[in-house]
Image: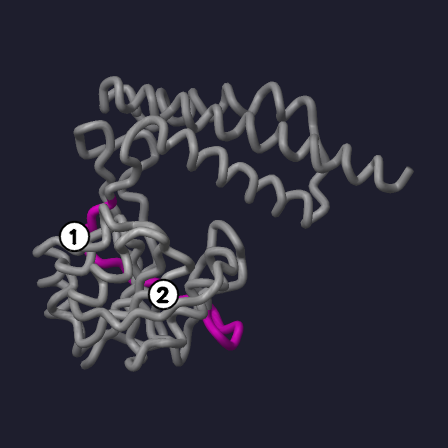
Amino acid sequence: MPISAVIICKNEESNIERCLKSLDWVDEIVVYDSGSTDNTINIAQKLGAKVHQGPWLGFGPTKHEATKRATHDWILSLDSDEEVPLHLKQEIQSKLATLDADYIYKIPRLSFYLGRWIKHGGWYPDFQLRLFNRKTHQWNQAVIHEKVEPLKGDTEHIAELDNYFHHYVFKNIEHQVQTNNRYSTLQAEAMFKNGKSFSYFHLFTKPYVKFIECYIFKLGFLDGWAGYAIARNAAYSALLKWLKLKELNDGRHDTKK
């Protein structure tokens, strides 16, 4: 059964080669690039990927657009900072002939950060819906926290693979802070669009609750100082999200005046 690997990217020259080389077993690799100014496109083309260029539309819409460019209906979706290790490759190959198009297949994801594989703090198993048949499923239109969903509104059926893929999540702490800033903006805008109002109670409590959740309840402390950095950054991201929602709510109020 043929399968297409589909990847979205922008300025990922430090990651794209590792990702593509881990996919040398699939029938086709489709790369959708949304404006790289580095060597990403050249690397992808040299490694045999079919490169398409287009605008950034948000995570869900962009992945949806990228999936449309594939030749085959079975889709394995990856980000450019991810890779398929041998054990997952072998599992997918062994199960290809028995995959059911009515199911979405979720895959555990193991992330590497600050010199170690992170196994706690809510970062593992971190299941991702990434293997599906586009005749029956497709990415939704969420600009953040995108999800693969049934096309016809049918009941969602999910099966689980046993082996994980790798995620090289952040280059360093600065990269994590930059990502938190970008994602918190998208989250605040989504909340604002959905009519969510700012709450001082949530502003003061959510960051503390998030730190305790990640570091204590989800055992982030077992990942050493990396676990502490992850929990603190998660709390910081929660703070930014609510501050930015306040900013948006105030702007809406001023506009009405």
Check the image and report above or below for 6 versus 254: below
* Magenta stretch contains residue 157: yes
Q: Given contact means CB atoms under 8 Å apart, are the residues at marks 1 and 2 in contact?
A: no
Q: Secondary structure at mark 1?
A: helix
Q: Secondary structure at mark 2?
A: strand
Q: Amino acid at mark 2?
A: Tyr
Tell me the tag on residue 32: 2
Viewer-proximal residue among 157 and 137 = 137
Q: Which residues are magenta?
A: 150-167
In the rendered image, the residue lying farthest to the right is 257
Check the image and report above or below for 256 versus 19: above
* Magenta stretch contains residue 171: no
How crowded pointer 2 is (Cα within 10 Å; few <14, some 14-19, many 20+) is rated as many
Check the image and report above or below for 178 versus 87: above
Tally the marks: 2
Location of residue 166 in the rendering, given as x and y in whole percent from the top left corner: 20, 47
Q: Amino acid at mark 1?
A: Arg
- Asked which quadrant contains residue 198, the reply is top right
Q: Residue at x 68, y 49 (%)?
A: 194
- Which numbered disc flags the more N-terminal residue, 1 or 2? 1
Viewer-proximal residue among 105 and 21 = 21
- Asked which quadrant contains residue 91, the reply is bottom left
Q: Residue at x 79, y 40 (%)?
A: 252
Q: Does 74 sit left or right of 236 as displayed?
A: left
**Residue bearing mark 1:** 18
Tell me the tag on residue 46: none
Q: Residue at x 43, y 33 (%)?
A: 178
Q: Does 156 sit left or right of 205 as displayed?
A: left
Viewer-proximal residue among 137 and 233 = 233
